[in-house]
């Protein structure tokens, strides 16, 4: 068992014929993902990688192939409309990799999805991978992942990979890894993913990687304290970041007390999460909390 994606995933790739879309469609296929269709306006009728039919619209692809998941590699100015197009036909899970989508576009998307039965992961994220189901919907390097029972959720793509590498090196596999993205407005929050892991029988413990900016980590701390029944180890990066300066992600900026790394660490520690002191200690910290549980 896993969260969000599994052997039943039927993947549509929007922007499939572009450089990034083509490359990562191939990598998803190689990993074992059931990639059933692609969409690029004006390229309908083509076949990508000798097996993926290309359609002009998501509606056409949906009618012909019935996907339940979409992976988006569309340029920033078109990405919001691509998300809405996928939601309109009833695709349940949308993973948007695109970086640089204007904030006002994502505010529009967020409002539009409020009454839809659609889960959005991203944008500006590495995606989702469930190693036990050999299913990848994203851009993460598949060779560092191994099946297991640790869930990973992170705002940082690079630190997701670091966490997974360390877990694998200490013999701890992953149930599902989710990169929620580092933009100011994203589709899924820490709390959204923690709820899924809490209900997942195949996940025994969770690694949560946060960073400066926003208050998502504090909201996660409240959920951990009140409802989560699995151990959590959390790493918060950006402890030395100066106020008012963006550090990497668009959402990684200190604009108030809640945005400070120190406040996030305090909230998570008070909620019972084990605090990972530095990125190099991810693997050993989760090993220790598993021994104690």
Image: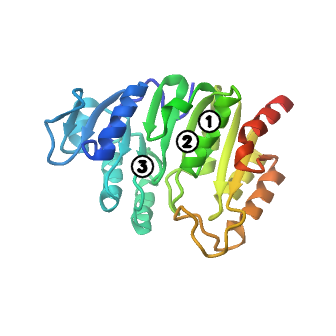
Which comes sooner in the sequence, label 3 or label 1?
A: 3
Query: Image height check: is 182 above or below 29?
Result: below
Q: Residues within 10 Å of mark 2 (few under 14, many from 20)?
A: many
Marking on residue 178: 2
Per the image, label 1 sits on a secondary structure element best described as helix
Tag in front: 3 or 1: 1
- Give the percent coordinates (x, y) of residue 287: 78, 32
- Per the image, the residue denoted by label 1 is 165
Residue at x 48% of width, y 39% of height: 140
Per the image, label 2 sits on a secondary structure element best described as strand
Query: Image height check: is 114 above or below 171?
Result: below
Query: Image height check: is 116 above or below 63?
Result: below
Which comes sooner in the sequence, label 1 or label 2?
A: 1
Residue at x 56% of width, y 30% of height: 145
Specify the quadrant of the image occupied by residue 290.
Answer: top right
Compared across the picture, whether 131 is left or right of 14 comes to: right
- Give the percent coordinates (x, y) of residue 34: 36, 27
Is there any visible trace of residue 223 in the rendered image? no
Instruction: Please identify the residue farthest to the bottom as the structure is shown.
Output: 244
- Per the image, the residue denoted by label 3 is 97
Is there any visible trace of residue 155 in the rendered image? yes
For the residues marked 3 and 1, what is the alpha-carbon distance in whole angstroms? 21 Å
Compared across the picture, whether 6 is left or right of 159 comes to: left
For the residues marked 1 and 2, what is the alpha-carbon distance in whole angstroms? 15 Å
Tag in front: 1 or 2: 1
Compared across the picture, whether 128 is left or right of 159 comes to: left
Per the image, label 3 sits on a secondary structure element best described as loop
């Amino acid at each position: 068992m896993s969260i969000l994606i599994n052997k039943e995933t039927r993947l549509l790739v929007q922007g499939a014929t572009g450089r990034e879309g083509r490359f990562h469609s191939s990598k998803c296929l190689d990993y074992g993902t059931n990639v059933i269709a692609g969409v690029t306006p004006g390229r309908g009728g083509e076949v990508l990688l000798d097996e993926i039919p290309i359609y002009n619209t998501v509606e056409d692809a949906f009618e012909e192939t019935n996907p339940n998941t979409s992976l988006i590699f569309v340029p920033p100015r078109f990405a919001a409309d691509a998300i809405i197009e996928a939601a309109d036909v009833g695709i349940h899970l949308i993973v948007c990799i695109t970086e640089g989508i204007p904030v006002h576009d994502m505010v529009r998307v967020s409002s539009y999805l409020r009454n839809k039965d659609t889960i959005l992961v991203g944008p500006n994220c590495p995606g989702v991978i469930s190693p036990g189901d050999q299913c990848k919907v994203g851009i993460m390097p598949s060779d560092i992942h191994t099946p297991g029972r640790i869930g990973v959720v992170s705002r940082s793509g690079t630190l997701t990979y670091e966490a997974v590498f360390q877990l694998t090196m200490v013999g701890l596999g992953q149930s599902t890894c989710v990169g929620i993205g580092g933009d100011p407005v994203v589709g899924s929050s820490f709390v959204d993913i923690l709820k899924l892991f809490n209900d997942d029988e195949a996940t025994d413990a969770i690694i949560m990687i946060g960073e400066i900016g926003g208050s998502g980590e504090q909201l996660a701390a409240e959920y951990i304290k009140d409802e989560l029944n699995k151990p959590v180890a959390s790493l918060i990066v950006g402890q030395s970041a100066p106020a008012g300066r963006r550090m990497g992600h668009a959402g990684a900026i200190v604009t108030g007390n809640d945005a400070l790394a120190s406040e996030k660490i305090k909230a998570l520690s008070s909620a019972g999460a084990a605090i990972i002191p530095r990125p190099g200690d991810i693997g050993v910290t989760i090993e220790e909390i598993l021994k104690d549980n």
